[in-house]
Amino acid sequence: MTALERPATRPQNPFFSSGPCAKRPGWSLDNLKNALLGRSHRSAAGKARLKLAIDRTRTLLELPDDYLVAIVPGSDTGAVEMALWSLLGPRGVDVLAWEAFGKDWVVDVVKQLKLGDVRVMEAAYGQLPDLAKVDFSRDVIFTWNGTTSGVRVPNADWIAADRQGLTICDATSGIFAQRLDWAKLDVITYSWQKVLGGEAAHGMLILSPRVVERLESHAPNWPVPKIFRLTKGGKLIDGVFRGETINTPSMLAVEDWLACLDWAEGVGGLDALVARADANAAALDRWVQSADWIEHLAADPAIRSNTSVCLQFADRSDEEANKGRQKAVVKLLEAEEAAYDIGAYRDAPPGLRIWCGATVETDDIEALGPWLDWAWEQTR
Ligand SMILES: Cc1ncc(COP(=O)(O)O)c(C=O)c1O
């Protein structure tokens, strides 16, 4: 076999981390020069900025008019936990997990909230649990796109339209790259640093009218910290959904989110964002098909992510050796400034994880393939 030559061109933007994700093409600190810094977020100007971030998010996502949107503390984790602590209790719970983050929500429900009537439905890395077994008379918690396994739900057809329970969906690495069926989702959460490449800080909490009903009719029988509280005296604190945040937000991060929305609208809105991620994932898949040493962790294309694409080594006879090889490839490509942060998540099978979300350019995915082949050979 002839040795591969070191590729002549690097990806222009070698940022392939699955969070924080690549900044959008053209991002610059100059975009933030109008940030409302040193002003109160409760001033008229501060509230207007926060409300604008909410309203423009709603427009870009094409949300139903009666869904509520809030900027909340604690990033995506904050938004999910706010929902779990505020809503669970009145019904049994089905909690689905097929990778690390879904498993975190299992821990919350089983070990922290200690709910009695819980069915945990798990699947191994690369697979989904049997969605046909989910019972929608219960509350259902799931992750739309499992960032650490690269497995997503294919659609929302498996969710009952006439459900009695609530669906609580951690959508952080799917939203803006995959079409979500709003009518099937009651709680949707995400954070800014994923598909649109915003600054990490805040979570977004999107609620259907059915959630408001639950919030106003149910009082959790455990303490709810102020940071998670969505009701006061049994009534929704509706200001939260107009930009009156629970505590102090970063106005710099808010400004960056507004600039993300500008970019997203400029490239053509939601369909264009989905198309960009699809094109990136397709380009990466073409390379995977050409390489004999690596394969998709999600064997079934129908459940394969178009954002956090997870790959495993074809030879899996020695896991420890593969972990070493993963480290070596990642280190070499970082040193070469050809790719950053592409190692598989620590709990996932050894391999690579390459972010293909909307802020990544397809040319860069195409330029990455030869570097991966080269690094694999170099670390043999
Ligand atoms: C599916 C999923 N859920 C939750 C989180 C945690 O998000 P955050 O760090 O924004 O709280 C992540 C982070 O990557 C994630 O991918």
Image (cartoon, helix red, strand yellow):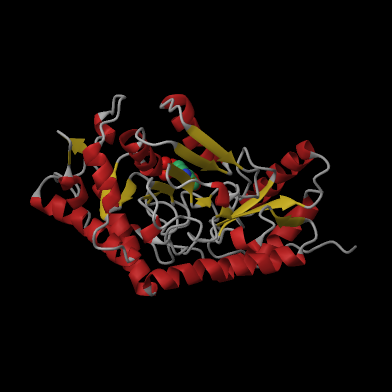
> Eyeballing the image, is 21 above or below 120?
below
**Residue that protrudes farthest toward the right in the picture:** 1
Q: Residue at x 71, y 50 (%)?
A: 312
Q: Nearer the viewer, residue 144 or 90?
A: 90
Residue 373 visible in rendering: yes
Q: Residue at x 54, y 49 (%)?
A: 146
Q: Is residue 18 left or right of residue 165?
A: right
Residue 250 visible in rendering: no
Q: Position of residue 351 (x, y in %)?
A: 69, 48
**Residue that protrudes farthest toward the left in the picture:** 44
Q: Residue at x 80, y 63 (%)?
A: 4
Quadrant holding the N terminus: bottom right
Q: How many marks?
A: 0
The quadrant in which residue 202 appears is top left
Q: Position of residue 132 (x, y in %)?
A: 56, 52
Q: Position of residue 138 (x, y in %)?
A: 43, 42
Q: Nearer the viewer, residue 243 or 379?
A: 243
> Eyeballing the image, is 124 above or below 276?
above
Q: Residue at x 59, y 53 (%)?
A: 151
Q: Is residue 202 left or right of residue 194?
A: left
Q: Position of residue 235 (x, y in %)?
A: 16, 40
